[in-house]
Amino acid sequence: MPSAPPATTAPTGTAAPARPQVAVARHQALGTDVVLAMTEPELVPEANAVLEGELEAIDRCCSRFRADAEIGLLHGARGRWVDVSPLLFEALRVALDVAEYTGGAVDPTVGAAMERLGYDRDFKAVAHRGPPTPAAQPAPGWWTVELDQRGRRARVPDGVTLDLGSSAKALVADRIAAGVGALGTGVVVSVGGDVSIAGPAPLAAWTIGIADDSGDGEGVEAVVSMTEGGLATSSTASRWWMRGARRVHHILDPRTGDSALAVWRLVTVAASNCVLANAASTAAVVWGFEAPDRLEGMGLPARLVGHDGVVVTTPGWPGR
């Protein structure tokens, strides 16, 4: 094993130190595995405090599954302007930026569609089988959400439910990496497959394993080496459940309000930060067969795995 532990990009991520100077801490939060690896072991207590604080803050702001989450104030405001915290404002701004960046392929207004499909609670509590779902409807559209930066306010149309899960998870990965890196250590953090890197890497690079989350095994199916930026993996094979005779998953096509056509089992994208990597990997699932050309056109290194096992990569993919 090269210079650092693999920080798996699957929701069941694991990490193990390859050299004694790299410390690893594991957590459970946001319904997924969180793995932190750093080059200065003596800073682990401070790093864990940063990590735990950021995870609790983003959950308290953005969770659809917490009755006390701040985002619930927007949903209950019946279309009125609401003063929001700096963190929720940032999460909303990032979600809208992601929607624009992906041409609407990743849209935060899919919350009601998620609930119609049965994803209305922490995934571990979602019934694996259930009755057929009501007819899908297109998402209201990210452009219906309004932000007032000067007043730090937000407005969501009455009846619209936001789901910030995808972009908020990537955002918190970037925030944790920045916060821990500011302590004076190199760091890589994986939040359920959303990976962010800050500070100096050990020796040549961080070695990051991309786990096979098909449900058939737990092995690492690809390895990349990175010194900076973000990496994200989106999958149609991990968070899925049955509704009637139909298999559905958690990545929705906003145009239909239904699970995106599962052309790809696994899409991994590298970018300058985790938010952009996650935006592109999620959008790639929605784009389907067009994804490789779109990602190449955006200049993003990516690895896409079809359900038949065929692997497609775009130029610059850092795999080996």
Image (spheres, grey):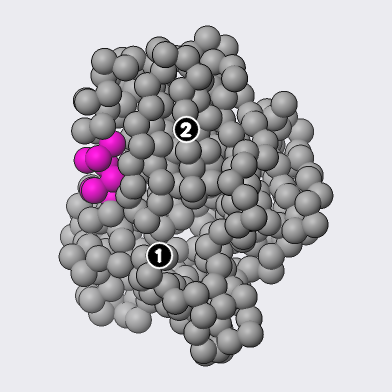
Farthest front residue?
217
Label disc, if present, on residue 124 of the rendered structure: 1
Q: Is residue 6 magenta?
A: no
Of 56 and 230, which appears nearest the observer?
Answer: 56
Q: Tell me, yes or no, if residue 220 can be seen here.
A: yes
Amino acid type of the residue that numbered disc 2 sits on in the rendered structure? Ala
Instruction: Please tell me whether the stretch drawn in magenta is mainly helix, strand or loop.
Output: helix
Label disc, if present, on residue 266 of the rendered structure: none
- In which quadrant is the C terminus drawn? top right
Amino acid type of the residue that numbered disc 1 sits on in the rendered structure? Lys
Label disc, if present, on residue 15 of the rendered structure: 2
Q: Quadrant of residue 265?
A: bottom right
- C-beta proximity under 8 Å, tags 2 and 1: no
Of 15 and 313, which appears nearest the observer?
Answer: 15
Which segment is the magenta one? 51-58
Q: Secondary structure at mark 2?
A: loop
Q: Is residue 62 left or right of residue 33?
A: left
Q: Tell me, yes or no, if residue 290 can be seen here.
A: no
